Image: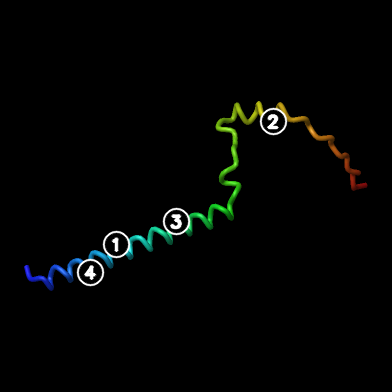
Amino acid sequence: MRPSDEQERKNVMESLRASLLMLCFGGFLLAYLIAIDRQHWFALRPASGTVAALSDAANPIPAKQETAAIGP
């Protein structure tokens, strides 16, 4: 192989590596910006219906507000 071919191959590999790093950086930045906008994705939630029922049972029931019936 000629030295110029080796240099050209090295340049192509460096360009490919730089492009790949920029793509990864952009992907991570996009994921970060999406994640900070949707904080509810990371809230702890019950894993099953049973746990959800137990959690609801532990919370006090708020007072019901009676509304006046509208009608004849």
Q: Is residue 19 left or right of residue 67?
A: left
Amino acid type, label 2: Asp
Amino acid type, label 1: Arg
Q: Residues within 10 Å of mark 1 (few under 14, many from 20)?
A: few
Q: Which mark is residue 11?
A: 4
Q: Residues within 10 Å of mark 2 (few under 14, many from 20)?
A: few
Image point 88% across, 39% down: which residue?
Answer: 66
Question: Could you tell me how far apart the alpha carbons at marks 1 and 3 are, in whole angstroms?
Answer: 17 Å
Q: Which mark is residue 17?
A: 1
Residue labelled with disc 2: 56
Q: Where residue 10 appears, x then y in whole percent?
A: 20, 66
Amino acid type, label 4: Asn
Are the two marked residues, 4 and 3, in contact with CB atoms closer than 8 angstroms? no
Q: Nearer the viewer, residue 24 or 61?
A: 24
Residue labelled with disc 3: 28
| 1 vs 3, front mark | 1
Are the two marked residues, 1 and 3, in contact with CB atoms closer than 8 angstroms? no
Q: Quadrant of residue 7?
A: bottom left
Amino acid type, label 3: Phe
Image point 60% across, 47% down: which residue?
Answer: 40
Q: Secondary structure at mark 3?
A: helix
